[in-house]
Amino acid sequence: MLKRKEFFGSGNSNENNSEQLNRVIAGTEITGDIVSNSGILIEGDVIGNISCSGQVKIGNSGKLKGNLVCVNAEIEGALEGELTIENLLILRSTARIKGDIEALKLNIEEGAFFEGACVMKAPLSSTSYNNDVSFVSEED
C-alpha cells in the first residue's frame, strides 16, 4: 500500500524530475491540455494537447487526439495530431499515427502506420556548414 508521502511526493524540490512519471492508466479518459516537466505514460485516452519537457510514451492501449510537443517520444498506440519532438521519436510496430511529424531523429519499426508529412530537424550546434557545395558528375 502506498503511504501518503509516496503518493503525493516528499515535497523535496531537489528530486530529479526525470525519475518522476505521470501515468494515465487504461480505462481513464482525460479531456484537456497537459503540461508537464516530467515524463508521461499514456495507456488510456487523452483528448487535448500535451507539452512535456521529458519523455512521453503512448502505450499499446493509449490514444492521443491532439498535438504532442516533447523531448523524446515512444509510440505504441494511436495518435491523431501533430508531433514536434526535440530529439528522438520511436514508432513501434503497433503505432498508428495520423498527422505531421517534426523530429531530430526518427525510428520506425516494421508494421507501424504513419499518415502525414515528416520534417527532420537539423541538430542544434555551433557548427557552421559551408554553403559552397560542389557535385562530381560521373561524366568527368
Image (tube, grey):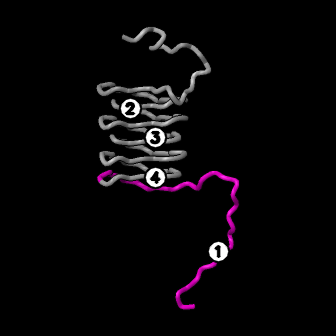
N-terminal of the two: label 2 or label 1?
2
Q: Magenta stretch containing residue 136, yes or no?
A: yes
Q: Which residue is mark 3?
A: 67
N-terminal of the two: label 4 or label 3?
3
- Contact check, label 1 and label 4, Cβ < 8 Å: no
Q: Residue furthest top?
A: 4
N-terminal of the two: label 3 or label 2?
2
* Mark closer to the observer (3, 2): 2
Percent of width and height locating residue 27? 29, 25
Percent of width and height locating residue 10? 53, 13
- Contact check, label 1 and label 3, Cβ < 8 Å: no
Q: Residue at x 30, y 45 (%)?
A: 94
Q: Residue at x 51, y 56 (%)?
A: 120
* Mark closer to the observer (4, 3): 4
Q: Which residue is mark 1?
A: 133
Depicted 77 relative to depicted 4: above or below: below
The amino acid beneath tag 1 is Val
The secondary element bearing badge 3 is classed as loop
Report whether 137 appears left or right of 67: right
The secondary element bearing badge 1 is classed as loop
Q: Which residue is mark 4?
A: 106
Q: Residue at x 30, y 27 (%)?
A: 26
Depicted 12 relative to depicted 17: above or below: above
Q: Magenta stretch containing residue 80, yes or no?
A: no
Q: Which residue is mark 2?
A: 42
